[in-house]
Image: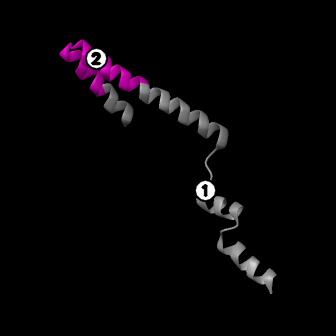
Amino acid sequence: MLGVCLAAMLSLAFSFSDSSLIFHVTFLVLIAAVLFVLLSSFLAETGLVSVEHQMQEMGLSKENVGDKSNKSN
């Protein structure tokens, strides 16, 4: 959806033939592309982890809380 919006903005900038507008919209598209590449590479390295899995790793899930109370008795 973001790509469609950026493409529409770029086409409107070219239709107005305003060089400063074309430069600014092109710069915006470049920033969006760089952020997309960085996010994709970050997700490729780390992967998506569910909140439940993160809570289990930190010992905050309900199962771990019950285990800790049983161990303390």
- Residue 66 placement (x, y as % from top left): 71, 79
Residue at (78% x, 83% y) in the render = 70
Q: Is residue 58 above or below residue 47?
A: below
Task: Inspect the image, locate mark 2, and give the three-letter code of the amino acid beneath it.
Answer: Ile
Q: Residues within 10 Å of mark 1 (few under 14, many from 20)?
A: few
Count the marks: how many?
2
Tell me, yes or no, whether the highlighted magenta stretch contains residue 52: no
- Residue 3 placement (x, y as % from top left): 38, 31
The image quadrant where one finds the N terminus is top left
Relative to residue 73, is residue 35 drawn left or right? Answer: left
The image quadrant where one finds the C terminus is bottom right
- Residue 33 placement (x, y as % from top left): 46, 27
- Which circle marks residue 20 in the picture? none
Residue at (70% x, 67% y) in the render = 59
Q: Is residue 12 above or below residue 47?
A: above
Q: CA distance from mark 1 to mark 2?
A: 41 Å
Tell me, yes or no, whether the highlighted magenta stretch contains residue 28: yes
| Location of residue 41 (image quadrant) | top right
- Residue 7 placement (x, y as % from top left): 33, 25
Instruction: Determine which residue is flagged by label 1.
Output: 50
Mark 2 falls on what kind of element? Answer: helix
Residue at (43% x, 27% y) in the render = 31
Relative to residue 53, is residue 15 drawn left or right? Answer: left
Q: Which residues are magenta?
A: 8-30
Task: Give yes or no for contact between labels 1 and 2 (Cβ–Cβ under 8 Å).
Answer: no
Mark 1 falls on what kind of element? Answer: loop
Task: Inspect the image, locate mark 1, and give the three-letter code of the amino acid beneath it.
Answer: Ser
Relative to residue 33, is residue 21 drawn left or right? Answer: left
Of helix, strand and loop, which mostly describes the magenta segment? helix
Instruction: Determine which residue is flagged by label 2.
Output: 22
